[in-house]
Amino acid sequence: MKPILAIACCALLAAVIVRAQSPSAPQWYKVVFDLTTDDPQDQTAVLRWLREVASANPRSEMEVVMYGRGLALVVSGRSALTDDVAQALARPHVSFKVCEIAMRNQKVDKSQLLANVATVPDGIGEIVTRQKEGWGYIKVVAH
Amino acid sequence: MKPILAIACCALLAAVIVRAQSPSAPQWYKVVFDLTTDDPQDQTAVLRWLREVASANPRSEMEVVMYGRGLALVVSGRSALTDDVAQALARPHVSFKVCEIAMRNQKVDKSQLLANVATVPDGIGEIVTRQKEGWGYIKVVAH
Amino acid sequence: MKPILAIACCALLAAVIVRAQSPSAPQWYKVVFDLTTDDPQDQTAVLRWLREVASANPRSEMEVVMYGRGLALVVSGRSALTDDVAQALARPHVSFKVCEIAMRNQKVDKSQLLANVATVPDGIGEIVTRQKEGWGYIKVVAH
């Protein structure tokens, strides 16, 4: 083996070893948060987690799916955290999606949702789809 | 290219585009619900979700796995929602499965379970198996 | 076919049939528990589940990831279940991992953690990684 090739091999091996030894290296990932309560502790928790995941891994993609009582976080007049929701949605890879079935049940119209909050026909179906696509799943419970 | 072939290609392309543009098209899926509380709000929530998923996607397969305090929903004399459980189980693709470890812990015999409620040797193992099989996972929390 | 070969084939076939007929046969699996509350019922539940999964399937691998209020279970002076945590960690395939972001938020130093409790740079990232690796996911809620 020529010296230059041997050096290249050693460098590659070293890189692999270093890589294997740094499991804490920041990596980006995709995660869907499932919010089904209107508990203020759960609401502030998911907003904090969005901030923290984004600051640790700016490329991470995050989606908050709300159904049941989870809607309260993004309905105008019911949400106590409208500024925090706006700040979360200003980040590049964050989306909030509300279940349209839950909206019909609770007589909430799209016009009542905070700016840039999206809707999906079926919140549970959205989460199951994301899981099938390989996204991580986190149930939001902090109370 | 012959005209008939060109038309066929266009039709196929159009179908693909329409498909891609209708994410709200009803699709069926498989989902396992994890119930570990006896909170009435959690119990009514999971029964409502079963109804809603079934009415949106009649072919969807749903399984409710109960362990810990989750058993209360399907134990005769303890459940306040026996009619709703029976209605849920009357649907074609719905099953309720109780953890036998939890049953032993709580001295619940199979004869005390509501009609058509099944048991599994290990509730957590059942959920993990479903996840490995590609089922979606939803933790039931609504209180 | 020689008699010895025929007998071997029958034995193999019988083994396959028995295997297929015993879905309750203890199987080992990998599961990550997500703990984000300091509720005593949630804490005792996850410790009981670790015991039960291990006694049903001694080869099963279990990991408890704690962030948010979940830290309380393993912080010296705050945990009411230090003996149970030590017993859980004495098992061969059990690990407890605390989110370092949550530790910084709550001004908890590594020296305050119970013996053999590990840390991870990002608790949510740890869970998402495990899910991608094919581990089952259980959100701990029992209250």
Image (cartoon, coloured by chain):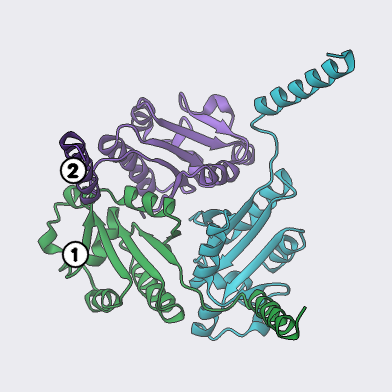
Chain colours: A green, B purple, C cyan
The answer to whether any part of residue B78 appears in the image is: no
* Circle on res. B118: none
- Residue shown at 69% from the left, 41% from the top: C27
Local crowd size for mark 1, using a 10 Å CA cut-off: few (<14), some (14–19), many (≥20)? many
Q: What chain does badge 1 belong to? A: A
Circle 1 or circle 2, nearest the eye: 2
Residue B7, quarter of the rendered image = top left
C-alpha separation, residue under disc 1 versus residue under disc 2: 43 Å
Q: Helix, strand, or loop for circle 2?
A: helix
Question: Image quarter for residue A40?
Answer: bottom left
* In this picture, residue B87 sits left or right of residue B38: left
Give residue B120's position: percent from left, percent from top: 58, 34
* Viewer-nearest residue: B67 or C41: B67
Identify the residue at horizontal 51%, vertical 54% (top origin). C142
Which x, y percent locates residue C138? 53, 54
Relative to B55, is B134 on the left or the right? Answer: right
The correct choice, above or below, for C97 with respect to A103 in the image is below
Q: Which residue has dot 2 on it?
A: B10
**In front: B77, or C45?**
C45
Circle 2 marks a residue in which chain? B
Please, what secondary structure does the residue beneath circle 1 have? loop
Looking at the image, which is closer to me, C47 or A13?
A13
Q: Mark 2: few, some, or many residues within 10 Å (few <14, many ≥20)?
A: few
Q: According to the image, label 1 marks what residue?
A: A75
Could you tell me which residue is drawn at 51 percent across and 63 percent down? C128
Q: Is residue A43 above or below residue A17?
A: above
- Amino acid carrying label 2: it is Cys
Q: Position of residue C7 (x, y in %)?
A: 84, 17
Vertically, is A7 above or below A67? below
Does residue A108 appear anywhere in the picture?
A: yes
